[in-house]
Image (spheres, helix red, strand yellow):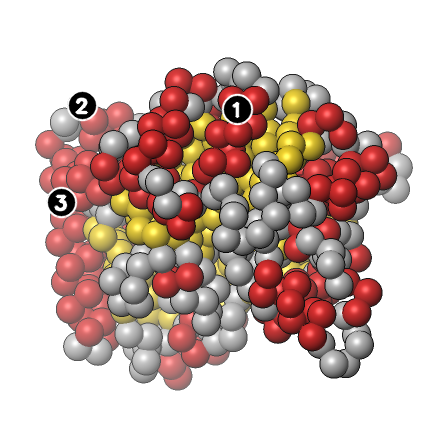
């Protein structure tokens, strides 16, 4: 791969305004070409690009194309920065009117140096907000696609699409379907802007000469015009990769543009060493529906603020994953202490095969690591180039272990929120349905946890969520239909769980195998769960709490008929029986180890709490987490 840095522009506007500035603050910059002006962190703008591409492992050679007017500046820069002076190409132009045009400058290097390799082209005078992205990731994405590559970014608020080349990108294939060079305001719906940052395959290089033969006027020899012709008319396959950062100083800009964006980007960089992000995800209770969405059923679940997982991300020199002192113990009081903790905490490892290898949040460090790995993999595949920033991750959680409240997925969910915030990944890049699938894949693909989507969906959407996982929906769109429901005036729900639960993962038994084999009892039961969910949705919308209570009780009895008492276990049955003694509706909120109830008579709440506590259970009144009435779950 050859890299060509273009700095042959005649920045007459910026240069003129620097010379005419009466304050004297910029007199020392008079006559300096735009690419050699101070950039973020005091480095010259071109210094950043040279540091980015100066690696023999990726580029066999790097060329710099300038003009005759500024050639001596770049020759001096090359000598001072260990850039091969012989690779500084002079296009011979001295004025804006006499310029060759960006595409012609590229063709000059290719022709004069007889290049026949794949080429990366970058405008060396662009100011970039985050100046340390992973150029190797860009090249890997380019090599994975059967075509050319155009880098784009999402316009920041206030930026006009009429000042940029606008691309429309297919979200599934990442192919650029349309290129609009500086369209009139309102013409383009897309806010994705292309910059002079491209990769061209060697087989495509002849198209450059063909394009120039069709463009005798220099004003039409810009890269925007070239890509507009290549994509819209020649219909060559061009793919887009997003850099989640801002770009400025593109084209003819003035002194006010330079000082404004330099101050903004410098402020961002100065604040970045102390950048700290804290995100929470909440435990959930299943209020109604099938015990696992792996049966293409329906369910309603609610996130609760009583229990949460919190992940903190702080920018650091190296990437560090910090173990939790309780959940990832590495220090013990004695060998006996190690033995007792390992016997108790490690019981989950011995209860089953890999299907419950990391059930619950036991060993949360693995969850952090798997999420980071999957995140990088996802961004690379989806055409998102990440900055080369490092961070330290640590987590905390108060979600009780092994009682089916989605503790492990809460840690993954909170970690993903931190990573998205840190790398400026937006809702457009990772929509909520895709995010839920991502969290599930972290657990199933990376850690071999038996899991379904419903926990991940409610932790992504938060609040009270209706979920339909019908096979047709899953096949057609890759995810179900997820609807956030009104949380105002909810009845009083309570939660009780075993203080020393057994492995909740065993609660699923062999029901899935029976369902896959078409056993009528199981198939009809799953249809019944879906019907109960739709009826509960109506009850919630109509605030018919007595009806909702009936449906919750029916939900448990249907589950009991399919799973059997032996599978449900004596602890779960004991809690259900105890709740019914006080007239409370009750069901399992997850895979087992806990029960959730709806208490119509709050006068009995104190007595019921006492009875559960005397039975060795933990009892609490549920505090629903309503995202619309709460602060953001992430804090910077």
- Tell me the quadrant of the picture where the C terminus can be found: bottom right
* Side (left or right) of 5 relative to 580: right
Q: Tag 1: Cα neighbours inside 10 Å, few (<14), some, or many (≥20)?
A: some
Q: Tag 3: Cα neighbours inside 10 Å, few (<14), some, or many (≥20)?
A: some
Q: Quadrant of residue 508?
A: top left
Q: Position of residue 18 (x, y in %)?
A: 70, 69
Q: Whole-Å distance between the Cαs marked 2 and 1?
A: 63 Å
Q: Earlier in the sequence, mark 3 or mark 1?
A: 1
Q: Whole-Å distance between the Cαs marked 3 and 2?
A: 15 Å
Residue of label 2: 517
Numbered tag placed on residue 527 in the rendering: 3
Furthest toward the right, the residue is: 334
Secondary structure at badge 2 equals loop
* Side (left or right) of 554 relative to 593: left
- Tell me the quadrant of the picture where the N terminus can be found: top right
Residue 198 to residue 160: above or below: above
Q: Nearer the viewer, mark 3 or mark 1?
A: 1
Numbered tag placed on residue 110 in the rendering: 1
Q: Quadrant of residue 16?
A: bottom right
Name the foreground residue: 537 vs 64. Answer: 64
Q: Are marks 2 and 1 in contact (CB under 8 Å)?
A: no
Name the foreground residue: 632 vs 518. Answer: 632
Secondary structure at badge 1 equals helix
Residue 281 to residue 430: above or below: below
Residue 494 at least partly seen: no
């Amino acid at each position: 791969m050859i890299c060509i840095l273009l700095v042959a522009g005649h920045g007459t506007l910026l240069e003129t305004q620097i010379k005419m500035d009466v304050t004297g603050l910029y007199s020392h910059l008079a006559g300096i070409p735009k690419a050699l002006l101070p950039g973020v962190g005091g480095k010259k703008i071109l210094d950043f690009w040279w540091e980015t591409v100066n690696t023999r492992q990726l580029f066999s050679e790097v060329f710099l194309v300038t003009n005759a007017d500024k050639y001596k500046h770049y020759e001096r820069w090359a000598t001072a920065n260990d850039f091969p002076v012989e690779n500084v190409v002079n296009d011979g132009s001295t004025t804006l009117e006499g310029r060759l045009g960006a595409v012609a400058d590229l063709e000059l290097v290719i022709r004069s140096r007889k290049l026949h390799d794949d080429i990366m082209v970058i405008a060396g005078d662009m100011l970039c907000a985050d100046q340390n992205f992973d150029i190797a990731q860009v090249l890997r994405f380019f090599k994975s696609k059967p075509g050319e590559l155009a880098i784009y970014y999402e316009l920041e608020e206030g930026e006009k699409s009429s000042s940029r080349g606008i691309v429309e990108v297919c979200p599934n294939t990442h192919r650029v379907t349309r290129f609009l060079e500086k369209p009139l305001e309102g013409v383009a719906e897309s806010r994705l802007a292309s910059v002079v940052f491209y990769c061209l395959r060697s087989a495509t290089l002849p198209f450059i000469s063909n394009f120039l033969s069709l463009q005798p006027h220099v004003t039409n020899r810009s890269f925007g015009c070239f890509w507009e012709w290549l994509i819209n008319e020649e219909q060559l396959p061009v793919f887009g990769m997003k850099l989640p950062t801002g770009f400025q100083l593109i084209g003819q800009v003035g002194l006010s543009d330079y000082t404004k964006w330099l101050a903004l980007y410098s402020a961002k960089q100065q604040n970045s060493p102390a950048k700290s992000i804290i995100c929470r995800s909440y435990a959930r209770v299943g209020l109604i529906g099938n015990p696992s969405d792996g049966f293409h059923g329906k369910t309603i679940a609610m996130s609760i603020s009583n229990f949460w997982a919190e992940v903190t991300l702080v920018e650091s020199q190296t990437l560090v994953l910090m173990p939790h002192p309780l959940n990832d113990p590495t220090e013990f009081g004695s060998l006996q202490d190690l033995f007792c903790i390992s016997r108790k905490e490690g019981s989950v490892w011995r209860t089953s095969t890999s299907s419950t290898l990391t059930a619950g949040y036991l060993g949360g460090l693995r969850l952090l690591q798997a999420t980071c790995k999957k995140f990088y993999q996802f961004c690379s595949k989806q055409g998102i180039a990440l900055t080369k920033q490092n961070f330290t991750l640590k987590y905390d959680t108060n979600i009780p272990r092994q009682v089916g409240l989605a503790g492990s997925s809460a840690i993954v969910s909170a970690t993903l929120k931190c990573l998205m915030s840190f790398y400026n990944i937006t809702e457009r890049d990772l929509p909520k349905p895709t995010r839920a699938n991502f969290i599930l894949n972290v657990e199933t693909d990376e850690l071999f946890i038996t899991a379904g989507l419903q926990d991940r969906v409610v932790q992504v959407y938060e609040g009270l969520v209706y979920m339909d996982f019908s096979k047709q929906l899953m096949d057609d769109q890759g995810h179900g239909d997820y609807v956030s429901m009104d949380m105002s005036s909810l009845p009083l729900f309570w939660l009780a769980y075993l203080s020393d639960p057994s492995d909740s993962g065993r609660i699923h038994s062999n029901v899935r195998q029976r369902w896959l084999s078409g056993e009528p009892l199981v198939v009809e039961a799953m249809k019944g769960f879906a019907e109960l969910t739709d009826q509960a949705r109506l009850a919630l919308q109509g605030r018919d709490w007595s009806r909702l209570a009936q449906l919750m009780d029916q939900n448990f009895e249907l589950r009991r008929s399919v799973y059997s008492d032996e599978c449900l276990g004596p602890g779960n049955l004991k809690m259900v029986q105890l709740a019914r003694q006080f007239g409370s509706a009750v069901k399992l909120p997850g895979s087992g180890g806990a029960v959730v109830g709806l208490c119509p008579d709050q006068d009995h709440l104190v007595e019921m709490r006492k009875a559960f506590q005397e039975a060795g259970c933990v009892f609490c009144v549920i505090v629903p987490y309503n995202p619309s009435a709460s602060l953001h779950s992430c804090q910077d």
